[in-house]
Image (cartoon, rainbow, N blue to C red):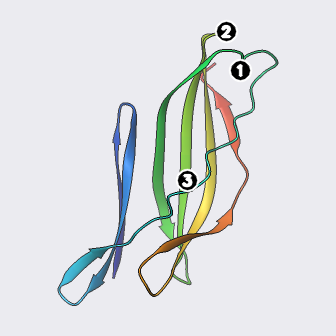
Amino acid sequence: MRVAYSIHEHSGGVMSVHFRKGSAFLEVLLPDDLPDPHIRFRKGADAEVRTYAATLTPIRWLPLGSLKITCEQTVLSLVENVNYTGTLPMAIGFKRSGHGFLQKLGKTKTTTDE
């Protein structure tokens, strides 16, 4: 049995993955170097920006034991006063040693709050 969950707060959140071993659930180490979404701004909108939220969210377990997740980052363009959100899907695989690794990387989808 395996469990993945995330806790979202105003400025971001944390994600945890646990595998069951006997009667206990042991936390699995996730990669430290997961990529951030590459947000596409309108021309000039990225001159002055502030990142204020970044979260990892588990989506579903894949048939071979990998975990599909999304990395979402929200950035405020101070030039336009518009929020840009980049969502990057990826799959995390797991080694027998209990360490996660980046298995597959999707493409960033950028949206605005307009």
Which of labels 2 and 3 is toward the front? 2
Earlier sequence position, callout 1 versus callout 3: 1
The image shows residue 40, relative to residue 80, as above or below, that is below
Q: Nearer the viewer, residue 3 or 24?
A: 24
Left or right: 21 in relation to 70: left
Residue 30: x, y in percent?
A: 45, 65
Q: Check whether the beta carbons of the residues at disc 1 and disc 2 lie within 8 A of each other.
A: yes
Residue ID for mark 1: 46
Residue 73: x, y in percent?
A: 55, 37
Q: In which quarter of the image is the C terminus?
A: top right
Quarter of the image for residue 86 reads: top right
Give residue 57's mark.
none
Give residue 79's mark.
2
Q: Which of 74 and 33 is in front in this view?
A: 33
Left or right: 54 in relation to 110: left
Amino acid type for the residue under numbered disc 2: Val
Q: Give the residue furthest to the bottom.
A: 22
Dot 3, how many residues are within 10 Å of its Cα: few (below 14), some (14-19), or many (20+)? many
Amino acid type for the residue under numbered disc 1: Asp
Q: Is mark 3 on a helix, strand or loop?
A: strand
Q: Give the residue furthest to the left.
A: 23
- For image coordinates 70% across by 57% down, the residue present is 106
Distance of mark 2 from mark 3, alpha carbons? 27 Å
Give residue 70's mark.
3
Q: Check whether the beta carbons of the residues at disc 1 and disc 3 lie within 8 A of each other.
A: no
The image shows residue 73, relative to residue 100, as above or below, that is above
